[in-house]
Amino acid sequence: MRNEFAQVIGSSAVTIADCVKQQSLARGRHRHVEDAHRVRECDGRKTMIIYRLLASGVSAAALLFAAGVAQAQDFAISKENINAGKKQYSPYLYQSYPDRVFWGDTHLHTSYSTDAGMVGNTLGPEEALRFARGEQVISSSGVPARLIRPLDFLVIADHSENLGLSPMIEESNPELLKDPMGRKYHDLVKSGKGWEAYQIWKQSGATKKDSMPNPALQRTAWERIIDAVDAFNKPGVFTAFHGFEWTSSPNLVNLHRNVIFRDGAKEARQVLPLTAFDTEDPEALWDYMEAYEKKTGGRALAIPHGGNMSQGLMFAVETMSGKPIDAAYAKRRMRWEPLYEVTQIKGDGETHPKLSLNDEFADYYRWDKGDFGLNPKKPEMLPHEYARSALRIGLEKEQGFGVNPFKFGMVGSTDSHTSLATTREENYFGKFAGSEPGSPHRFDDLVSQDLRPDGDGSLNVYHWETLASGLAGVWARQNTREALWDAMARKEVYASTGTRMLVRVFAGWDFKPDEVHRPDFAPQGYQRGVPMGGDLSTAPEGAKPKFMVRAMRDVDGANLDRIQIIKGWVDANGKSNERIFDVAVSDGRKIDNDGRCKTPVGDTVDVPNASYTNTIGNALLAGYWEDPTFDPNQRAFYYVRVIEIPTPSWIAYDEKIFGKKAPEQALRKQQERAYTSPIWYTPKAS
């Protein structure tokens, strides 16, 4: 029996034992609400493990042995309540599929990021976490702030380069003052020359040399962030992840990645964040994460972002050393970077109107002037900067060497440097502390400046061009680090430009048109198909992939215009293509034979009053779709895009509230949207 347990149950006993230990401690205290929650959470985890093992054929005796290993006196199971193989009354005993969307931000900066703290952000990790879980805080500019509803999770993703410099200047940290440059930064700031100090610091970054290479300073800041994150992490209530941003910017080109750890403080303390001073090569970041996992037994993933400022390098088909990417590269990239941050404050990165000529929704908050101020954009760079075109390139490369290097899921996040994860148009606190609501530079603050010696300002990007975006929606069963991280790793996630609409899609071979309306829509989807982020293969003879999609508006937001499926595929010549299909549209409009609805949803936006009504659109849309162009021999991807009806932008809200006009070309109304992770089809021969 002991051998059976060891072979079949494996790590489950550890999980059960850990739960029992937590329960014993919690029951012994009987003092805190979180203790009671911990007991209930562990009960659920134990029960889930038990039923999964029973369903897998593990004997009741082995489970009872597990109970003994895990302190049987506190293990709520006995011979009487084990009924292996017996049909139970409750239909939910064996239900284990993801049943909730958890909303969060995987990319938030606090005062511990030097480009936030040294330009006015005074809020640290604690304030950021309190705000994310729904508490009111006072912003750096003195404005009271609160979310409409709490987030479910947050990643403090501060820049690893000179982490915590600003707070250490503020406190006159002794270790900082030992360093000559640290002393210089400190004295400049304390004498009222903070902007001068920041410019000197930026120059050191431009030279790729760390002006104060002191691991002790980084360790101090990292430990403080770890302590704050662990203090706010409450399994089942609010998840706080350990992480950081690696800020690779060769020649001011954006190759940034956010690293997210699955683990707790014990593992996070065993490393220091990798910096761009250490390396600018993403493959070296993968080496770092691999070393982390070997050293700690933990897990890590990275999320790239900002491809629209990468000058074609984000999804390049050559490595940084100039070699063509190959199957080995593709495997490593998808091992460590399963997701892409497709939308954020610095523009939307789904597609570009020059890449998607037949997409009337493609021209959405484009940031396509260049990099961070040194080089203008060239047309040939665009396909390697946007998600849809990158997904297409991935199919082409897979056709060539058998592995897809760009098989990523999609999330949104903010990249806010205010410590405030705000994504609603009427509650947008901006990119930096100097552009918070009511600031005199709210519109004309430079987010990216033309730095060319002979520059004419054409590379300047102003705050009025920013997008109040985005959020990550994660399909999971529990609000814990493990459950959310695992969902990210399997790509069962989607991106929103700011609102919290619910979106779910399944693909399979035998769905029927009316099944999208079934009350057990989700169980059927998981049993007979795959969800977002999944893979279809081996098409049955004569079958076409069938999709069931549901979308529901944000309960505090706008109605929906339409649900679309964007398909990409590779033809017999190895060339990728794309096509958009409207799957469900609101207000009884017609979808033509070409799969498109030509009738706009309408527009109720009153720009001067920053208002709209839900008298158009639908609160809920559902669609069933079969691919009419399916060829079982062609690789393909499919992702869902959901479009809301027009609503006022943050510009319109600001103009109404503060009475100050933004430039005429600023967007005063827009259509929020969501993008799911794709579902891929691979031919059998592959």
Image (cartoon, grey):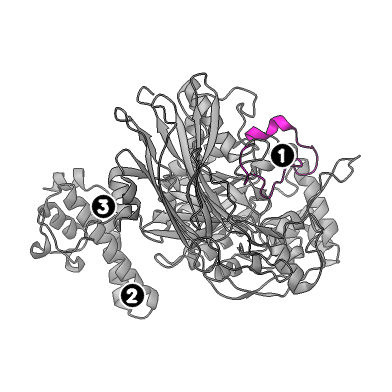
Q: CA distance from mark 1 to mark 3?
A: 46 Å
* The disc label shown at residue 253, or none: 1
- Quick one: label 2, few (<14), some, or many (20+) residues within 10 Å? some
The residue type indicated by label 3 comes to: Ser
Q: In the displayed structure, does residue 575 sit left or right of residue 21?
A: right
Residue 554 shows in this picture? yes
Residue at image location 8% in from the left, 64% down from the top: 80
* The disc label shown at residue 12, or none: 3
The quarter of the picture where residue 77 lies is bottom left
Dot 1 falls on a residue whose secondary structure is loop
The residue type indicated by label 1 comes to: Val
Comparing marks 2 and 1, which lies closer to the viewer? 1
Residue at image location 68% in from the left, 36% down from the top: 354
The residue type indicated by label 2 comes to: Ala
Q: Are marks 3 and 2 in contact (CB under 8 Å)?
A: no
Q: Of residues 374 and 642, which is closer to you in this image?
A: 642
Q: Quadrant of the C terminus?
A: top left
Pick whichever of labels 2 and 1 is earlier in the sequence. 2
Dot 2 falls on a residue whose secondary structure is helix
Read off the magenta span. 358-384
Label 2, on which residue?
36
